[in-house]
Image (cartoon, coloured by chain):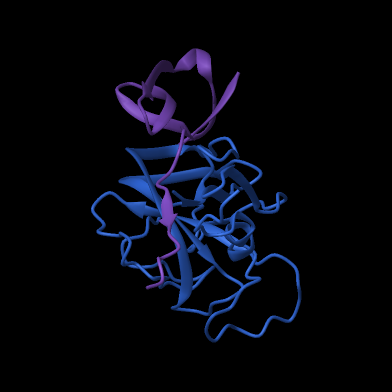
Chain colours: A purple, B blue
């Protein structure tokens, strides 16, 4: 598979692939990195937001 | 059945469409939805509820505190908006108005070397260079991108998870 890198497209067989993830109340995130001779040549990230702050409104009492 | 003091839930949805105007509003040339964009914010930034505007110039000058890098356009990317705002009652005195972008926000083939950890949603249609009115700021874990994609997938468009939610309690 070809991977876009800082050197242009490279075959992934030439690269070292590293993956990671994060999951908490705010997000579920994954990332993939490709390294060439200890140099990071590609990093993509996918963040899925789970929720967001809520803005509350209120009808005030009269009198 | 007694009367109940409450905001009317349909009002919450109509706030999101600019139907109600208690002050002085922009003159709208069309009834179509405004265009919104998403700009990425540096982790070193101090954006918060007091950040009223996107202060850059879309397409040419990044805002102070915004990311910059290969293939990143000043002002970020346009948000896909195919779903109209909705509102839903949860009780005689409470409800939620809500809206969520209809697609993921994607920054393609970018290199963003300085870490960023937030996105600002702002209105392009009702603003101008240096002062595009901001809607919200959403944070996430700090990231960098190297010759890759940054994809921001939206939460579910529900009363409890939508990206923009106005609620009465």
Q: Residue at x 52, y 84 (%)?
A: B23
Q: Residue furthest top?
A: A13
Q: Nearer the viewer, residue B14 or A23?
A: B14
x, y percent for residue B51 = 34, 67
Q: Is residue B83 above or below residue A33?
A: below
In this rendering, the count of numbered labels is 0
Q: Is residue B63 left or right of residue B163?
A: left
Q: Is residue A51 left or right of residue B12?
A: left
Q: Is residue A44 above or below residue B18?
A: above
Q: Residue furthest front?
A: B1
Q: Is residue B46 left or right of residue B151?
A: left
Image-quadrant location for residue A36: top left
x, y percent for residue A4 = 54, 32
Q: Nearer the viewer, residue B5 or A55?
A: B5
Q: Nearer the viewer, residue B31 or B41?
A: B31
Image-quadrant location for residue B153: top right
Q: Nearer the viewer, residue B49 or B89?
A: B89
x, y percent for residue A34 = 42, 23
x, y percent for residue B59 = 54, 68
Q: Residue at x 36, y 23 (%)?
A: A22
């Amino acid at each position: 598979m070809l991977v876009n890198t800082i050197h242009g497209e490279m075959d992934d067989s030439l690269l070292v692939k590293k993956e990671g993830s994060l999951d908490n109340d705010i997000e579920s995130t994954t990332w993939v990195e490709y390294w060439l001779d200890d140099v990071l040549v590609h990093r993509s990230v996918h963040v899925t937001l789970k929720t967001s702050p809520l803005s509350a409104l209120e009808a005030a009492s009269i009198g | 059945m007694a009367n109940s003091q409450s905001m009317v839930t349909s009002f919450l949805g109509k706030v999101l469409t600019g139907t109600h105007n208690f002050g002085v509003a922009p003159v709208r040339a069309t009834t179509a939805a405004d265009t919104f964009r998403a700009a990425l914010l540096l982790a070193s930034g101090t954006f918060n509820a007091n950040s009223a505007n996107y202060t850059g110039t879309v397409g040419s000058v990044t805002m102070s505190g915004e990311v910059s890098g290969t293939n990143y356009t000043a002002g970020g990317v346009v948000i896909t908006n195919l779903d109209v705002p909705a509102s839903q009652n949860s009780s005689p005195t409470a409800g939620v108005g809500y809206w969520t972008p209809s697609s993921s926000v994607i920054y393609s083939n970018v290199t963003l070397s300085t870490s960023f950890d937030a996105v600002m949603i702002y209105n392009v249609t009702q603003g101008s260079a240096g002062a595009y009115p901001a809607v919200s700021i959403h944070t996430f874990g700090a990231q960098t991108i190297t010759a890759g994609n940054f994809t921001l997938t939206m939460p579910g468009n529900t009363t409890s998870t939508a990206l923009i939610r106005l609620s009465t309690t």
